[in-house]
Image (cartoon, rainbow, N blue to C red):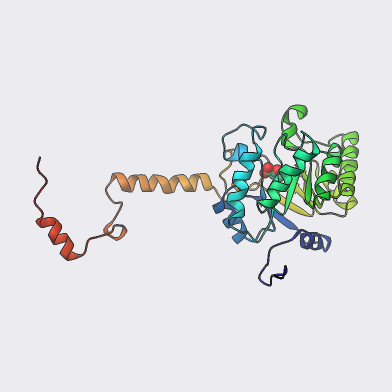
Amino acid sequence: MSHVSKSDARVTIPELQRRAASGEKLVMTTAYDSITAQIADAAGVDLILVGDSVGNVCLGFDNTLQVTMAMMNHHLEAVARTRPRACLVADMPYLSCDLGLVEAVRNAGGFIQRGAQGVKLEGGAARVPVVRAMVAAEIPVMAHLGLTPQALHRMGGFKVQGRTGKAAKALVEDALRLQDAGCFAILMEGIPAELAGRVTREVEVPTIGIGAGPECSGQVLVFHDIVGLGPDLPPKFVRRYLDGFSQFRTALEEWREDVRAGRFPSPQESYLLPREAREQLEAMAPPPN
Ligand code: KIV
C-alpha cells in the first residue's frame, strides 16, 4: 500500500516551516474536545493545540499543575477523533518529562500514537536532553519559553518574563539551544514584544507568540478567550471576538422561559401519533386507580 494519499490535505510541520519562512503568519488555537476542534478547523487555523490549559479553562483547576497524562490523553483523543486538517500538537503536562528520558519519550510518543503530529514542552535550555531524546524518537517538539505556567511558583505568579537585559539574553540563548536540539518551532508567552522580535530574527524555525507582540511568525490564543468564554477580565494580550458567555446565557434564559411558559416544545418539535393510533389511544379505557 502506498504511504502517499492524494486526499491527505493535513497541514504538516515542514509545510508550516516553509510558510513561516516565506513570511506567512501562522495561526494556532486550543481545542480540548471534538466540538471546539471542529470549529477551529472549520475556521481554517493552521495548528490546534490540546493545551494543558484544559486544567484551568475546562476542569476547574486554578492552574495547570494538576493536569495529568491521563487527562491530556483523554482530551487529545477527543480532538484527534475529528481528524482535523490543522496540524495537531499536544502539550506535555507538569512532571511528564521530569522522571527520566524513557518516561518522557514514552509519554510524548503516546501523544503521537493518539494522533498528535508534535508535542509542546515548557522550559529553557535545561530541556535540551529531553528534546534531543524525543527528536531521536521522531517526535517533533515545539519549545515553550517565557511565561511558562508550569513554573508558576518559581516565577511567583503569572508574570511577564524577560524584562531585564540578563533575562532577555538568557531567553535568546535558550531559543538558540532549543533550535539546535531540534525543536521545530518555539512558542513564546508573556514576554516583551521587542524580545520576541529579536528571537524571531535570530532563529530559523517559526516562533508562535501569546502576549509576545506582533513580530512572531505566528500567534496563538486560547479558544475560550477568543470567543468570550474565558474570565470576565482577560489579560491585555487577549482580543475577544464574541461575548460568548453572555450570548450562551441569554439563549439558555430564553429557553428556560419558553419551558416555564409552556411554549416549548411546540407541536413541530414533538413526535405525533398517526391519526388512527391517536384514536385508539383516546378510546382506551383509563387505567384503574
Ligand atoms: O496550554 C496552553 O493552552 C498553552 C497556550 C497558552 C500556549 O500553552
Regarding residue 241, the answer to whether it shows in the image is no
Q: Is residue 3 above or below residue 209?
A: below
- Left or right, 264 with respect to 131, comes to left
- Left or right, 153 with respect to 80, comes to right
- Left or right, 271 with respect to 131, comes to left
> In the image as oriented, which residue stretches furthest toward the front?
1
> In the image as oriented, which residue stretches furthest toward the bottom?
6
Q: Quadrant of the N terminus?
A: bottom right
Regarding residue 250, the answer to whether it shows in the image is yes
Q: Dividing the image into four equal quarters, which quarter contains ligand 1?
A: top right
Residue at (60, 40) in percent of width and height: 57
Residue 191: x and y in percent read 79, 40
Q: Write down the quadrant of residue 128 in the picture.
A: top right
Residue 46: x and y in percent read 70, 58
- Left or right, 36 with respect to 17, comes to left
Q: Write down the quadrant of residue 6 in the picture.
A: bottom right
Q: Quadrant of the C terminus?
A: top left
Residue at (66, 70) in percent of width and height: 7
Q: Write down the quadrant of residue 204 in the picture.
A: bottom right
Residue 66: x and y in percent read 64, 32
Residue 42: x and y in percent read 59, 61
